[in-house]
Image (cartoon, helix red, strand yellow):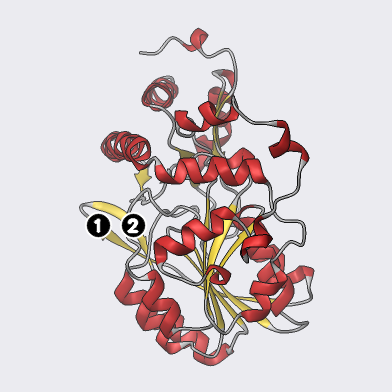
Amino acid sequence: MTDPKKYKELQYLDRNESQYGPSPKCYDFLKTVTINELSNYSREFAFGIKSSLSKMIADEFKLPEKQVILSYGSEDLLKQIIHYYLDRKEKILIPREAWWYYKKVAYEVGGFNVEYPMGKGFEDGVATYTYNVDKMIEIYDREKPRIVLIASPNNPTGNKISKEDLYRFLDACRGALVMIDEAYWGFGSMENDYVKPFLDEFPNLVICRTFSKYFGLAGLRIGYAFTGKNLEELMNYTVRYLGFNQISEKVGAIAYKDLEYYEKITKLMQEDKEYFYKEFSKLDGFTPYKSYANFMLVDMPHGIRKDLNKFLKDRNLLIKFLDEEAFKTETRITLGTREQNMYLMDSIKEFLSKK
């Protein structure tokens, strides 16, 4: 059992930030940053592109560079898309069991949220949330929203939508702008083969990703998105006259290329998720949910939440006790290092043994 005295500072397992950090090659680069990189604007416009990072990503996906846009994290992309395309009294279709922030942004421009519910089932013997595509299409046909949002993997439930189900849904809502939030791409799947074909067939599609999660660069705030051909206005709207953050771009590119490091970290996380599935399933009243992200959702008895929260904070552990309309008894746990995860599990068991 881990000695609580070892952790003298708070362990933040509540915001889905990487506890392993980015590729060591990122630190090597930062030690060599020059005055020109800090003092000068980007000159990438001279080459007819927005940035070296968007060009690198576009080349990998065999897309025109203009169809890859950069932003201040994928949160910024979400805000830009909704603020630009959603008019007053128009609707956005969002998941009910999802990130609370989705439900806030439409109101900033006088729009309205319409929610579709998740289903529940089992996968590999573990409880899971599911996308009910038939229900989603039914609600879309009835409500006719201007924008549709899908998160895959979804926060905080951790589930993802299959390519087949996603295609079927996109095919049913061609009249809307569809945004797929893939902020947690990489942890459960490295698939990319659908990106270009889907963009070619669905010109109102935006696929949003970030360097904050898989690449462990949340502090640099770099997001990027692939955009369909109909969204020329969005492509132009997101261009920055004076370019982007040169340091962030270069660090992002270094991280993007070091897949060996991130695959190793993801393997450790997957092993720890299996450990959590097993251990939480042994505890009365606890239900862990299958996750394809760097966090997992755990349902637990409502009556212990307040005391457990205090107990963990006294041991410098922070996890996210959700308190929303869709989540009253659930807790979201960010995957930490192997030692942090063991410490958390030991602490929860210690708490329960004293009840």
* Mark identifier at residue 131: none
Q: Position of residue 294 (x, y in %)?
A: 43, 43
Q: Of the residues shown, which amino acid type is indicated by label 2?
A: Thr
Camera-side residue of 154 and 266: 266
Q: Is residue 244 above or below residue 105?
A: above
Asked whether residue 332 appears in the rendered view, the answer is: no
345 lies above or below 302: above
Q: Amino acid at mark 1?
A: Glu
Under tag 1, what secondary structure? Answer: strand
Q: Residue at x 24, y 57 (%)?
A: 123
| Image quarter in which the N terminus is found | top left
Q: CA distance from mark 2 to mark 1?
A: 6 Å
- Quarter of the rendering containing residue 101: bottom right
The number of discs equals 2
Q: Is residue 300 left or right of residue 272?
A: right
- Residues at badges 2 and 1 in contact (C-beta under 8 Å)? yes
Residue nearest the viewer, comparing 201 with 56? 56
Residue 211: image location, x then y, percent: 53, 48
Q: Is residue 33 visible?
A: yes
Q: Which residue is mark 1?
A: 123
Quadrant of residue 157 within the rendered picture = bottom left
Q: Residue furthest left?
A: 124
Q: What residue is shown at x 59% (from left), y 27% (from top)? A: 32
The reply, left or right, for residue 217 in relation to residue 344 is: right
Compared with 62, 312 (above or below) is: above
Which of the 4 image quarters holds residue 283? top left
Q: Is residue 227 above or below residue 7?
A: below
| Residue 128 image label | 2
